[in-house]
Amino acid sequence: MGSMYYTPVRRNHLIGPAGVGSLLVTRSGVTVLMCGLPSWVDAVPAFGSEESARRADRVQRMRSQELHDHNLEEALGIDRLISPPVIEDKAKYATTWFVPAVRFPRGEYCTNPTCRSLGIASPESQSIGRCDRCTGKYPPRRQQTPVVLVCAFGHLAEVDWAGLVHPAGSCTGSPRLSYHIGNNSSAPEIRCECGAKARLDPSELRPCTGSRPWLPASGAEQCAGTMRVLDRTSTQVYYPDVRSAVHIPPDGGLRDAVIRWLEDDVVAVELRKIDADDARGLLLRRALPLFPDLTVQALEEHVQHLNQAAPHGDRFAVELEALTSGRRGTHTSDGPPILDAEVIQSELFAPGYVGDDSPIERVVAVHRLAETRVLAGFTRLDPPSRALEGAPGYSLLWGHQPNTDPSRDWLPGMRVYGEGILLELNPRQVSDWAKHATRQLMPITLQGEVLTAEFMLAHTMAHLLMNAASLQCGYPVASLRDRIYTVNGRTALLIYTGEGDMIGTMGGLVELAQPGRLEEILDQAYANAHWCALDPVCLSPVAHIKNDSPGACHQCCFLPETSCDWWNEGLDRATLIGRDELRGYLEEGRSARVFDGSST
């Protein structure tokens, strides 16, 4: 593709809102569709005089981008993760791995009000075209049509404009169409020079074409679903299915740096798969320049740890146990730790919010954590279901079901490092509160999962805390993320930095977990929960039945889509401050804090 398509995209956006199958506006002003993973593989620059040499070069370049997280790999049924490429040197564009895209939609119309001619551009067209029917030295520009057809099974197509005007295919000649927008951009009128005209009905359901334009080599497939008309900028066009896990360091005195090296080094990955003395000897000789004190026995223990099957059980329970264990990591000659979680003594906090008999039982200052994220697929029209096992979107990314092809045993993934604050709520108080709250809160089902009262409580508290913390910690709220734990009778929320660049390592968030600072943030979140510009409508459950957020809106609780894995669903300020007969969870703690004189 030409240089006009070279548009910088953050790596964490490729594992998210700009992933495979999404629509993206390039810096040349053209809306493009991010191609599937087969096109990613074909785009890897490879050199050599023979195809076998080029194939080997391509495999080697992809291996250099390998990433491993055994828990996620086991859950998704894949062998490895591949990190999206990063441009390190702009002078080496010829050897850079670019993620490909194609122009979509291809339909475009003239912006001249007296013309409005409709045409079809080439999928490789790199820039906004000009009208070929208008005269003059500088013909008017064309503009891409603003609507697309979307299927709940992930298919995407353009409107058949000629078929809309001439459903029977009859016309006096070659159809010459014009595109006219009225009061509703989703319902344009299409006119033909033969005199026929028709208006697009955005409410009409159409048989699905099975079109997969992000997979140019795969073509359409059979689909029994229906397609809806949507604006191409609608959030319903693309929901990335991102699976994530906090990376837990190994137990038993194993070294984080050795584990990371065994996972990332291309040669080490292959050698540790071979159970032979010669292979272990070669592996040790390769490791000694980096780890001079590493023994044969220690190396074998690290290899066995990686080669054993991933531990079974709820990974969220494993994460919560690791985060609340008080496990402190230290910076060594091997580098910084993977996890450094400091449990702060509750006695250091002012009475009210934190303590054995308070709403918050435990506060953890997570000085460093690592999160692995994987693009497991995507959905359209409705958010992805967290209840589905494996990678249900694999076929949408690759164009086929999983197979044994070693070049297609991966999904796009990345690892980010940052910091955070974890608050574990008092289990006894949460249990007592939930027994009453369950009768007052509307049941919410999100893509097959029932959101419990405990989840809504922790989720709402996390969003309000993120809004309050972003004003003091130096991070924009879009750089923060939440992670909710409701496992084994425990309820907790983790607020952490979610950027994969320097924005995620500034060091300001974890300071807010310290005594004196945390109480101020909780006070601010509690005050924000009491006031919304759209009250009383916002806090009324009747007004939000369709949104699954009965007491939340963009004025108070909603966050950018990159910050919330639950698409701003399952939020209600009443869980914290009360509404009618529903008691607010923080009411008692707030009253104790005010009575103690710690807050005004």
Image (tube, rainbow, N blue to C red):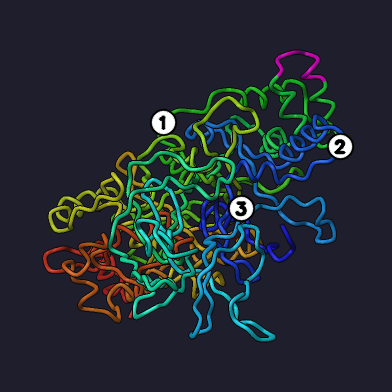
Percent x, y of residue 359: 30, 58
Question: Can you tell which quarter of the image residue 309 is in?
Answer: top right
| Label 3 vs 1, first from the N-terminus | 1
Question: Which quadrant, please, contains the N terminus?
Answer: bottom right
In the image: residue 238, left or right of residue 592: right
Secondary structure under the numbered disc 3 in the rendered image: strand
Mark 3 residue type: Tyr
Q: Who's the residue at 56% across and 33% down the image?
A: 70
Label 2, on which residue? 48
Label 3, on which residue? 417
State the separation of the CA atoms marked 2 and 1: 46 Å
355 in relation to 194, above or below:
above
Label 1, on which residue? 313
Q: Can residue 119 be found in the magenta stretch? A: no
Percent x, y of residue 522: 38, 68
Q: Residues within 10 Å of mark 1 (few under 14, many from 20)?
A: few
Q: Nearer the viewer, residue 55 or 113?
A: 113
Mark 1 residue type: Gly
Question: Which quadrant, please, contains the C terminus?
Answer: bottom left
Q: Can residue 280 be found in the magenta stretch? A: yes
Q: Residues within 10 Å of mark 2 (few under 14, many from 20)?
A: few
Percent x, y of residue 31: 56, 65
